[in-house]
Image (cartoon, rainbow, N blue to C red):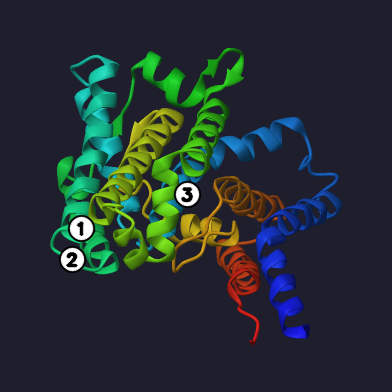
Amino acid sequence: MAQTLAVTWMAGLRRYVVYVGFLLVLLFFAIVLHDDGFLTTRNLLNIVQQTAPITVMAIGLVFVLTAGEIDLSIGSIVAVSALLAAVVMREQPAILGVAAGLGAGALIGLLNGALVAYLRLPSFLVTLATLGLFAGVGRTLTNLRSVPVTNDLFNGIFGSGKLFGIPSLVVWTTLAVVVGHFFYRETRFGAHVHATGDNPAAARSSGIKIQRLRLGVLVLSGMCAALAGLLYAGRLQGARYTLGESDLLTVIAAVIVGGTRLNGGLGSVFGALVGSLLMGTLNNGLILMGLSVSEQLIARGLIIVIAVAISLREPER
């Protein structure tokens, strides 16, 4: 009985740790930075806007991890997609730039998925390889030069503008979470993702085409990373090869702290959103506190280790 209660208690703790952690971090900075404008509407809205690309990537990664795979190439996809869109929009309409960026993400995801699903290669090694491969592509695409984006329509929709009176990045965050949660929880595809990650052999026996599903989640992840690249390009009104290169650990931390298991079968889109906001709030608060970059990295790393340890630790049985 005691062991059963311990298992139940730890499961509940892992489920809600991200929400409690987010509230505690928010409360801490609200007290410490009460005179520095931390709780102003402008600053809180800025946190949501800054974390929009992280949230979009995190939602794609929830599907991948739940299916029992991993995608380490998302940072490189961000840079390649943003750069390709920016280059196309030099001479072509914004719609073609968007199509080029999203298409690049889909093709890289398709490459990852085909190698994993049909050549039976481990997704960790495949996406680690394509992470380096497309990091190089991003650097050679424009010869290490930044590419400005001067298309006002694109910048307005994907970055600095407003849709229906709401900042566009907030709208993209909301759409990504709502659509992602619906497909994750309310569709057959989502159910198959859960079943495949929980027990691939049983999923195959029940008629689920798990190789096709693995291909699908990696394509989805690639397109989410590409959309994140477009959001970066719109917000910054330009693209460069460094976009997304430091986001991988932040995205993984947001997803894991948000309740998604590394070994598959269980996850949460809303948890990934809160995990992303937790990372963004932490970063924003540390900057307002005046910490140096090295001190920010130390503080953020310690908090992530504690949160992830609580999220992943299994009770003794």
Q: Nearer the viewer, mark 3 or mark 1?
A: 1
In the rendered structure, the answer to whether residue 33 lies left or right of residue 123 reads right
Mark toward the start of the polypeptide (3 vs 1) = 3
**Pointer 1 residue:** 117
Disc 2 secondary structure class? loop
- The mark found on residue 120 in the picture is 2
Question: Contact, CB < 8 Å: mark 3 with mark 1?
Answer: no
Question: Contact, CB < 8 Å: mark 1 with mark 2?
Answer: yes
Dot 1: few (<14), some (14–19), or many (≥20) neighbours within 10 Å?
many
Mark 1 vs mark 2, CA separation in Å: 5 Å
In the rendered structure, the answer to whether residue 234 lies left or right of residue 310 reads left
State the image quarter where residue 317 is shown: bottom right
Disc 1 secondary structure class? helix
Residue 297 screen position, x and y as percent: 56, 66
* Type of amino acid at the residue the image marks with label 2: Arg
Residue 55 screen position, x and y as percent: 51, 44
Residue 195 screen position, x and y as percent: 42, 57
**Pointer 3 residue:** 58
Whether residue 154 is situated above or below residue 53 in the rendered picture: above
Q: Between 209 and 150, which is closer to the camera in this rendering?
A: 209
Disc 3 secondary structure class? helix
Mark 2 vs mark 3, CA separation in Å: 25 Å
Tell me which residue sits at (81%, 57%) in the image: 28
* Type of amino acid at the residue the image marks with label 3: Ala
Q: Nearer the viewer, mark 2 or mark 3?
A: 2
Residue 136 screen position, x and y as percent: 18, 54
Q: Between 199 and 146, which is closer to the camera in this rendering?
A: 199
Dot 3: few (<14), some (14–19), or many (≥20) neighbours within 10 Å?
many
